[in-house]
Image: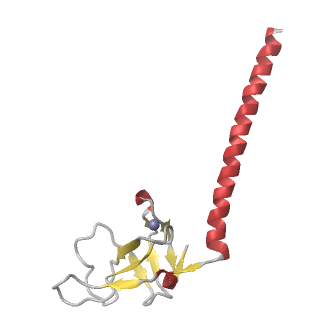
Amino acid sequence: MPLLAHQFLRFGVLKELLKAVGFFSVRLLEHLGDTFSGTSQKSMKLRDLEPHWSGGFYGGPPRRGTGVTFICPHCMRTHLSVMFSNPLDGGEPLPGWRVYWLRSGEDFDSLSLSPSINAAPQGHWHGFITNGEVR
Ligand SMILES: [Zn+2]
């Protein structure tokens, strides 16, 4: 009898655990589903996020394409800016930034950046810009 009670208890605990895991899996799938529909059904273009090239310092020499600024694909409110290690104008990277991205492509439709852009610690987007697509 004590054994049966023990087994019953174990089964009960297991059932609770499975329920918890099941719940978690469903939540995870819902989350993945959201992510998936966000990226695969409607691929977002950088061009749709009001991108513009960064220039130079105020009062400094004129620069072109030292970085790119665009609306955060996650919240669609804040602007995100990244600076290039290889600006469009062929000049040196704009000094004073902590991180630089390697750029390929000369316009918003062909732009690729490496590595990914991670603004997740600030509650914003984490993803890639590849061939002008945002994902
Ligand atoms: Zn955001």
Whether residue 3 sits left or right of residue 126 in the image: it is right
User: Residue 108, how many percent across, how many down?
Assistant: 46, 87
Residue 71: name its quadrant: bottom left
Viewer-proximal residue, 20 or 7?
20
User: Residue 126, how many percent across, how many down?
Assistant: 48, 65
Quarter of the image with the N terminus is top right
- Which colouring convention does the figure follow? secondary structure
Rendered residue at 22%/75% (across/down): 95
Rendered residue at 43%/83% (across/down): 51
Quarter of the picture for ligand 1? Answer: bottom left
Viewer-proximal residue, 91 or 1?
1
Q: Given the current orientation, which residue lies at the most extreme front position? A: 77
Residue 97: name its quadrant: bottom left
User: Residue 76, how many percent across, how many down?
Assistant: 48, 72
Quarter of the image with the C terminus is bottom right
Q: Is residue 20 above or below residue 40?
A: above
Q: Is residue 45 above or below residue 98?
A: below
Whether residue 134 sits left or right of residue 115 in the image: it is right
User: Residue 120, how many percent across, how many down?
Assistant: 45, 60
Q: Given the current orientation, which residue lies at the most extreme left position? A: 59
Viewer-proximal residue, 2 or 75?
75
Whether residue 131 sits left or right of residue 13 in the image: it is left
Q: Is residue 39 above or below residue 90?
A: above
Rendered residue at 39%/77% (across/down): 102
Rendered residue at 62%/72% (across/down): 39
Residue 21: name its quadrant: top right
**Count of marks, rendered view:** 0
